[in-house]
Amino acid sequence: MPLHLAVFATTPLELLSFLLSVATVWLNIRQSHWGWLFAIISSATYGLVFYGSRLYGDMGLQLVFIAVSVFGWYQWLRGDDSHSRLPVTALSARGRVLAAVAWLAGFVLLAWFLKSYTDTDVPNSDGFLTAGSLVGQLLLSRKKIENWHVWIIVDVLYVALYLHKHLMLTAILYAIFVGMALVGLRAWSGDTHSGGRRLALE
Protein backbone atom coordinates (compact mmCIF):
# COMPACT_ATOMS: atom_id res chain seq x y z
CA MET A 1 0.00 0.00 0.00
CA PRO A 2 1.36 3.44 -0.89
CA LEU A 3 2.10 6.05 1.75
CA HIS A 4 1.73 9.73 0.97
CA LEU A 5 4.42 11.91 2.52
CA ALA A 6 4.16 15.63 1.77
CA VAL A 7 3.95 15.90 -2.03
CA PHE A 8 5.13 12.40 -3.00
CA ALA A 9 4.15 8.80 -2.45
CA THR A 10 6.29 5.99 -1.09
CA THR A 11 5.75 2.52 0.34
CA PRO A 12 6.21 1.14 3.85
CA LEU A 13 9.12 -0.97 2.57
CA GLU A 14 10.90 2.03 1.04
CA LEU A 15 10.33 4.04 4.23
CA LEU A 16 11.76 1.23 6.39
CA SER A 17 14.76 0.92 4.06
CA PHE A 18 15.26 4.69 4.28
CA LEU A 19 15.40 4.66 8.08
CA LEU A 20 17.69 1.62 8.25
CA SER A 21 20.07 3.14 5.70
CA VAL A 22 20.38 6.43 7.59
CA ALA A 23 21.15 4.46 10.77
CA THR A 24 23.77 2.44 8.85
CA VAL A 25 25.71 5.48 7.63
CA TRP A 26 25.47 7.21 11.02
CA LEU A 27 27.00 4.14 12.69
CA ASN A 28 29.70 3.96 9.98
CA ILE A 29 30.67 7.55 10.67
CA ARG A 30 31.02 6.64 14.34
CA GLN A 31 33.06 3.56 13.34
CA SER A 32 30.61 1.27 15.15
CA HIS A 33 30.67 -2.33 13.97
CA TRP A 34 26.89 -2.48 14.49
CA GLY A 35 26.58 -0.49 11.29
CA TRP A 36 27.24 -3.70 9.39
CA LEU A 37 24.17 -5.37 10.91
CA PHE A 38 22.00 -2.46 9.81
CA ALA A 39 23.68 -2.62 6.39
CA ILE A 40 22.68 -6.26 5.99
CA ILE A 41 19.05 -5.60 6.91
CA SER A 42 18.71 -2.42 4.82
CA SER A 43 20.35 -4.13 1.83
CA ALA A 44 17.78 -6.92 2.00
CA THR A 45 14.82 -4.53 2.15
CA TYR A 46 16.20 -2.24 -0.55
CA GLY A 47 16.79 -5.25 -2.80
CA LEU A 48 13.01 -5.72 -2.85
CA VAL A 49 12.43 -2.01 -3.52
CA PHE A 50 14.82 -1.98 -6.48
CA TYR A 51 13.35 -5.16 -7.93
CA GLY A 52 10.00 -3.46 -8.09
CA SER A 53 11.57 -0.51 -9.94
CA ARG A 54 13.49 -2.67 -12.46
CA LEU A 55 16.83 -1.42 -11.13
CA TYR A 56 18.36 -4.87 -11.41
CA GLY A 57 21.93 -3.70 -11.03
CA ASP A 58 21.05 -2.06 -7.74
CA MET A 59 19.03 -5.11 -6.72
CA GLY A 60 21.96 -7.45 -7.35
CA LEU A 61 24.24 -4.96 -5.64
CA GLN A 62 22.29 -5.40 -2.42
CA LEU A 63 23.12 -9.12 -2.41
CA VAL A 64 26.79 -8.27 -2.81
CA PHE A 65 26.46 -5.66 -0.08
CA ILE A 66 25.16 -8.32 2.28
CA ALA A 67 28.20 -10.52 1.58
CA VAL A 68 30.63 -7.59 1.88
CA SER A 69 28.90 -6.47 5.07
CA VAL A 70 29.56 -9.85 6.67
CA PHE A 71 33.21 -9.52 5.60
CA GLY A 72 33.41 -5.92 6.81
CA TRP A 73 31.85 -6.79 10.15
CA TYR A 74 34.48 -9.51 10.64
CA GLN A 75 37.29 -7.15 9.61
CA TRP A 76 36.21 -4.41 11.99
CA LEU A 77 35.88 -6.85 14.87
CA ARG A 78 39.11 -8.70 14.07
CA GLY A 79 41.18 -5.52 13.77
CA ASP A 80 44.61 -5.29 12.19
CA ASP A 81 47.40 -7.87 12.19
CA SER A 82 47.99 -7.31 15.89
CA HIS A 83 44.23 -7.68 16.50
CA SER A 84 44.05 -4.08 17.62
CA ARG A 85 41.14 -1.96 16.42
CA LEU A 86 41.26 -1.65 12.64
CA PRO A 87 42.67 1.84 11.99
CA VAL A 88 41.55 4.35 9.39
CA THR A 89 44.15 4.40 6.62
CA ALA A 90 44.56 5.91 3.17
CA LEU A 91 45.25 4.18 -0.12
CA SER A 92 48.63 4.53 -1.78
CA ALA A 93 48.83 6.01 -5.28
CA ARG A 94 48.85 2.45 -6.66
CA GLY A 95 45.80 1.58 -4.59
CA ARG A 96 43.88 4.57 -5.94
CA VAL A 97 44.72 3.56 -9.51
CA LEU A 98 43.59 0.00 -8.86
CA ALA A 99 40.33 1.25 -7.35
CA ALA A 100 39.67 3.44 -10.41
CA VAL A 101 40.46 0.58 -12.81
CA ALA A 102 38.18 -1.76 -10.85
CA TRP A 103 35.38 0.80 -11.06
CA LEU A 104 35.82 1.20 -14.82
CA ALA A 105 36.03 -2.55 -15.46
CA GLY A 106 32.98 -3.18 -13.29
CA PHE A 107 31.05 -0.51 -15.16
CA VAL A 108 31.83 -2.01 -18.57
CA LEU A 109 30.86 -5.53 -17.48
CA LEU A 110 27.73 -4.55 -15.60
CA ALA A 111 26.45 -2.21 -18.31
CA TRP A 112 26.91 -4.95 -20.91
CA PHE A 113 25.14 -7.50 -18.73
CA LEU A 114 22.21 -5.19 -17.98
CA LYS A 115 21.80 -4.26 -21.65
CA SER A 116 21.98 -7.88 -22.78
CA TYR A 117 20.00 -9.75 -20.16
CA THR A 118 17.54 -7.38 -18.45
CA ASP A 119 14.80 -4.98 -19.44
CA THR A 120 16.21 -2.02 -17.50
CA ASP A 121 15.92 1.35 -19.20
CA VAL A 122 19.05 2.77 -17.53
CA PRO A 123 21.81 0.17 -18.07
CA ASN A 124 24.73 2.60 -18.24
CA SER A 125 23.91 4.69 -15.19
CA ASP A 126 22.84 1.60 -13.24
CA GLY A 127 26.05 -0.20 -14.16
CA PHE A 128 28.31 2.77 -13.42
CA LEU A 129 26.80 3.45 -10.01
CA THR A 130 26.62 -0.22 -9.10
CA ALA A 131 30.34 -0.64 -9.86
CA GLY A 132 31.19 2.50 -7.89
CA SER A 133 29.14 1.33 -4.93
CA LEU A 134 31.00 -1.99 -4.89
CA VAL A 135 34.33 -0.16 -4.81
CA GLY A 136 33.09 2.14 -2.04
CA GLN A 137 31.80 -0.75 0.05
CA LEU A 138 35.05 -2.69 -0.25
CA LEU A 139 37.07 0.38 0.75
CA LEU A 140 34.72 0.91 3.71
CA SER A 141 35.23 -2.69 4.83
CA ARG A 142 38.96 -1.98 5.12
CA LYS A 143 38.45 1.47 6.68
CA LYS A 144 40.06 3.28 3.77
CA ILE A 145 39.25 6.98 3.94
CA GLU A 146 38.79 7.10 0.17
CA ASN A 147 35.51 5.25 0.61
CA TRP A 148 33.93 8.61 1.47
CA HIS A 149 35.22 10.20 -1.76
CA VAL A 150 33.63 7.37 -3.74
CA TRP A 151 30.35 7.65 -1.85
CA ILE A 152 30.14 11.40 -2.41
CA ILE A 153 30.43 10.92 -6.19
CA VAL A 154 28.07 7.95 -6.27
CA ASP A 155 25.43 9.46 -3.99
CA VAL A 156 25.20 12.71 -5.97
CA LEU A 157 24.58 10.74 -9.17
CA TYR A 158 22.15 8.38 -7.45
CA VAL A 159 19.95 11.34 -6.52
CA ALA A 160 19.43 12.06 -10.22
CA LEU A 161 18.81 8.39 -11.04
CA TYR A 162 16.21 7.89 -8.32
CA LEU A 163 14.42 11.09 -9.29
CA HIS A 164 14.25 9.69 -12.81
CA LYS A 165 12.78 6.43 -11.46
CA HIS A 166 10.28 8.32 -9.26
CA LEU A 167 11.76 6.90 -6.05
CA MET A 168 11.41 10.25 -4.32
CA LEU A 169 12.12 9.11 -0.77
CA THR A 170 15.21 7.22 -1.89
CA ALA A 171 16.39 10.30 -3.82
CA ILE A 172 16.03 12.32 -0.61
CA LEU A 173 17.90 9.57 1.25
CA TYR A 174 20.85 9.81 -1.12
CA ALA A 175 20.88 13.59 -0.87
CA ILE A 176 21.17 13.08 2.89
CA PHE A 177 23.91 10.54 2.22
CA VAL A 178 25.93 13.19 0.38
CA GLY A 179 25.93 15.34 3.50
CA MET A 180 26.66 12.37 5.75
CA ALA A 181 29.55 11.30 3.51
CA LEU A 182 31.06 14.78 3.85
CA VAL A 183 30.69 14.49 7.63
CA GLY A 184 32.22 11.00 7.52
CA LEU A 185 35.19 12.23 5.48
CA ARG A 186 35.85 15.00 7.95
CA ALA A 187 35.40 12.74 10.98
CA TRP A 188 37.69 10.02 9.64
CA SER A 189 40.30 12.55 8.52
CA GLY A 190 40.66 13.65 12.13
CA ASP A 191 40.24 10.17 13.56
CA THR A 192 40.69 10.52 17.33
CA HIS A 193 41.78 6.90 17.54
CA SER A 194 44.88 7.66 15.47
CA GLY A 195 46.07 10.09 18.14
CA GLY A 196 46.17 12.88 15.55
CA ARG A 197 48.78 11.07 13.48
CA ARG A 198 48.77 11.40 9.72
CA LEU A 199 46.87 8.57 8.07
CA ALA A 200 49.11 5.65 7.18
CA LEU A 201 49.47 4.64 3.55
CA GLU A 202 48.65 1.02 2.69
Image (spheres, rainbow, N blue to C red):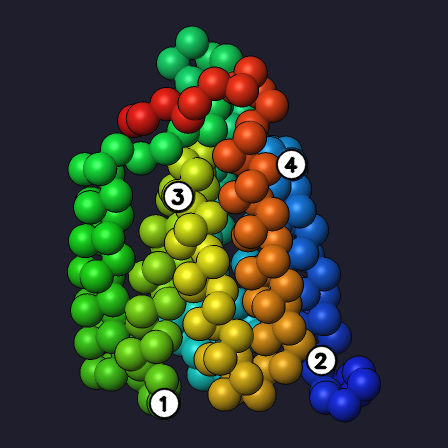
Q: Residues under labels 2 and 3: Cα distance?
A: 33 Å
Nearer to me, 18 or 94? 94
Helix, strand or loop under label 4: loop
* Residue holding disc 4: 30
Q: Position of residue 63 (x, y in %)?
A: 44, 58
The answer to whether the residue labelled 3 contacts the one labelled 4, judged by CB atoms less than 8 Å apart, is: no
Helix, strand or loop under label 1: loop
Q: Residues under labels 1 and 4: Cα distance?
A: 37 Å
Rendering quarter of residue 92: top left
Q: Residues under labels 4 and 2: Cα distance?
A: 29 Å
Determine whether, in the image, residue 30 is placed left or right of residue 54: right
Under mark 3, the amino acid is Glu
Which tag is nearer the camera, tag 1 or tag 4?
4
Which tag is nearer the camera, tag 4 or tag 2?
4
* Residue holding disc 3: 146
Under mark 1, the amino acid is Asp
Under mark 4, the amino acid is Arg
Rendering quarter of residue 132: bottom left
* Residue holding disc 2: 11
Q: Is residue 148 visible?
A: yes
* Mark 3 or 1, nearer chain start: 1
Quadrant of the drawing holding the C terminus: top left
